[in-house]
Image (spheres, rainbow, N blue to C red):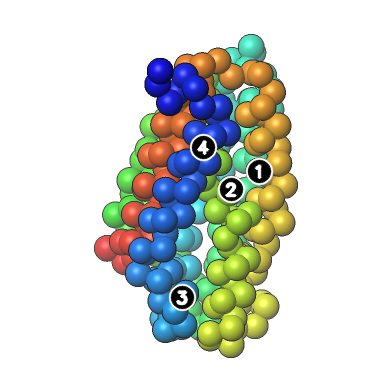
C-alpha cells in the first residue's frame, strides 16, 4: 500500500517540512548565522534578495484567487484576504534595508536571483490554473517559515550583529502574522473541502516550493 494511501495530509506535509528544515541547515548564509560568523553584509544581501521575491507575493495570491470558481468560494475568499494582508510586506524589508545603511534606490533596482526567478515563475504559472488548490502547499511552506523560523533568525542576527529592533522588523513581524495565517491554513486543510487529488497537489506544490525557496537562499546575488 502506498504512502499516499496510508498517511494523512498532515503527516505528508510534516515530512515535506522536515526535509525542508534539513536543507535549510546547509544553506551557507543560514549556516553562518547558526555558528555566529554571519556578517552585516550577509544580512544586507539576504534582505536585498528576499525583497525581489516578496514583492511578488500578493500578486500571485491575487491571481490564484481570481481562478477559483464558485464551488471553491471559501478558498477564493481566503486568498483575497491573504493577498490584502501581504501586499505591503516588501515595504518592511525596504525599511529594514535602509535602517542598516542600504540604498533604497539600489534595492528597488535589483533583480531576482536564480532561485527567486524560479520560485516566482512557478507561483505565477501555478496560480493561472483553474482552481489552484495546490498553492495551499506553497503557503504551508512560506507561511510556516515565517511562523517557525523568522523570529529566531531575527534574534540571532541581533545577537551576533548587535542590530536594533527597527532593523529586523520584517522577520519579527512574520512570527505573529504568519502564525495567524498558518492557523487559518490548517483550518482549510482539515475542513474536508479537499479531494484526494487536491491533497496530492498540495503535497507536490509544497515539495516544489520548499526546494525553490531553499534555492533562493542558496543563490544570493546570482
Going 41% across and 56% down the picture, which residue do you hit? 22
- Residue to which mark 2 is pinned: 143
Report the Cα–Cα distance between label 4 and label 3.
26 Å
Q: Position of residue 172 (x, y in %)?
A: 65, 66
How many other residues sit within 10 Å of disc 1, few (<14), some (14-19) or many (≥20)? many
> Image height check: is 38 above or below 6?
below
- Residue to which mark 1 is pinned: 182
Q: Earlier in the sequence, mark 2 or mark 3?
A: 3
How many other residues sit within 10 Å of disc 2, few (<14), some (14-19) or many (≥20)? many
- Residue to which mark 3 is pinned: 33
Q: Quadrant of residue 37?
A: bottom left
- Check disc 1 and report its element: helix, strand or loop: helix
Confirm or deny contact between disc 4 and disc 1 (CB under 8 A): no
- Check disc 4 and report its element: helix, strand or loop: helix
- Residue to which mark 4 is pinned: 13
Confirm or deny contact between disc 2 and disc 1 (CB under 8 A): yes
How many other residues sit within 10 Å of disc 3, few (<14), some (14-19) or many (≥20)? many
- Is residue 219 something that shows in the picture? yes
Confirm or deny contact between disc 1 and disc 3 (CB under 8 A): no
Amino acid at each position: 500500500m502506498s504512502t499516499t494511501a496510508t498517511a494523512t495530509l498532515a503527516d505528508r506535509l510534516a515530512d515535506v517540512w522536515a526535509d525542508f528544515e534539513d536543507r535549510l541547515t546547509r544553506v551557507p548564509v543560514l549556516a553562518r548565522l547558526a555558528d555566529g560568523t554571519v556578517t552585516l553584509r550577509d544580512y544586507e544581501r539576504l534582505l536585498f534578495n528576499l525583497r525581489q521575491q516578496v514583492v511578488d507575493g500578493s500578486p500571485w495570491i491575487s491571481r490564484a484567487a481570481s481562478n477559483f470558481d464558485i464551488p471553491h468560494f471559501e478558498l477564493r475568499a481566503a486568498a483575497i484576504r491573504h493577498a490584502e494582508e501581504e501586499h505591503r510586506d516588501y515595504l518592511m524589508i525596504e525599511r529594514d534595508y535602509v535602517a542598516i545603511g542600504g540604498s533604497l534606490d539600489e534595492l528597488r533596482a535589483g533583480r531576482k536571483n536564480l532561485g527567486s526567478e524560479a520560485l516566482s515563475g512557478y507561483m505565477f504559472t501555478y496560480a493561472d490554473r483553474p482552481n489552484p488548490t495546490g498553492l495551499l502547499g506553497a503557503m504551508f511552506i512560506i507561511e510556516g517559515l515565517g511562523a517557525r523560523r523568522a523570529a529566531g533568525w531575527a534574534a540571532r542576527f541581533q545577537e551576533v550583529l548587535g542590530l536594533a529592533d527597527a532593523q529586523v522588523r520584517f522577520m519579527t513581524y512574520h512570527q505573529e502574522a504568519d502564525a495567524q495565517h498558518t492557523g487559518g491554513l490548517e483550518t482549510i486543510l482539515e475542513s474536508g473541502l479537499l479531494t484526494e487529488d487536491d491533497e496530492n497537489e498540495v503535497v507536490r506544490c509544497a515539495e516544489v516550493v520548499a526546494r525553490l525557496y531553499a534555492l533562493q537562499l542558496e543563490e544570493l546575488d546570482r
